Amino acid sequence: MDLMTAARKVRDHAYAPYSGFKVGASLRSRDGQVFAGCNVENAAYPEGTCAEAGAIGAMIAGGATEIAEMLIIADCPRPVPPCGGCRQKLSEFAGPDVVVTLATLSGETQVTTVGALLPGAFQTGDMGAVPVPVAVAAQD
Ligand code: THU
């Protein structure tokens, strides 16, 4: 399935009763699988999770660890800017050159990269002795 179809489809399942802002995210992992996630809000607001986090969680559950391409869609006046936390999450599973397409429901898109979204991301290498995961090591 293409990423746009997957993200639009999963967005329909978003649980966003508090913000009313439904988001869908899809990604293709390096091994060719497509995973998708939507935002899931909670009455305890900070406990809610973003669509990107859902897609990454599905990827990890599916046995993949590296993102090759990502797409995020929302009913937004401009292509949806991912939140700071999601930019950091993405940077752990995708190299800086990985393409991220930001989209609106009405069909506008903006193509960017993980590195452009978060230059100078904190990496496990910054912790010195901590082992570097495969996906991150591949970027060096
Ligand atoms: N949200 C996402 O799922 N992804 C983003 O990149 C931006 C924000 C969600 C979180 C919350 O459920 C709602 O949008 C409003 O912030």
Image (cartoon, rainbow, N blue to C red):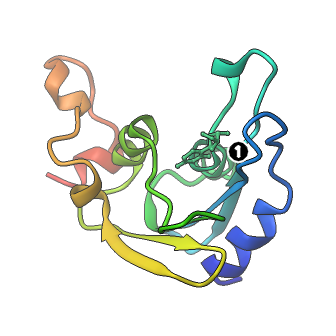
Q: Position of residue 128 (x, y in %)?
A: 13, 19
Hey, what amino acid is under mark 1?
Asn
Identify residue for label 1. 39
Q: Quadrant of ligand 1?
A: top right
The picture quadrant where one finds residue 89 is: top left
Q: Please name the residue shown 59% across and 42% down the image.
A: 53
Task: Kindly identify the residue that appears in the image at 73 percent across and 72 percent down.
Answer: 8
Residue 72 found in image quarter: bottom right
Q: Nearer the viewer, residue 30 or 9?
A: 9
Q: Position of residue 106 (x, y in %)?
A: 64, 81
Cβ of mark 1 under 8 A from ligand 1: yes
Residue located at (72% from left, 80% from top)? 5
Compared with residue 59, is residue 35 higher up or lower down, i.e. above or below?
below
Judge whether 34 appears above or below 117 on screen.
Answer: below
Count of labels in the image: 1
What x and y, as percent, mark residue 40?
76, 38
**Above or below — where is 6 with respect to 85?**
below
Q: Residues within 10 Å of mark 1 (few under 14, many from 20)?
A: many
Q: Is residue 103 left or right of residue 89?
A: right
Q: Is residue 77 left or right of residue 61?
A: left
Q: Name the residue: 24% across, 67% down.
A: 97
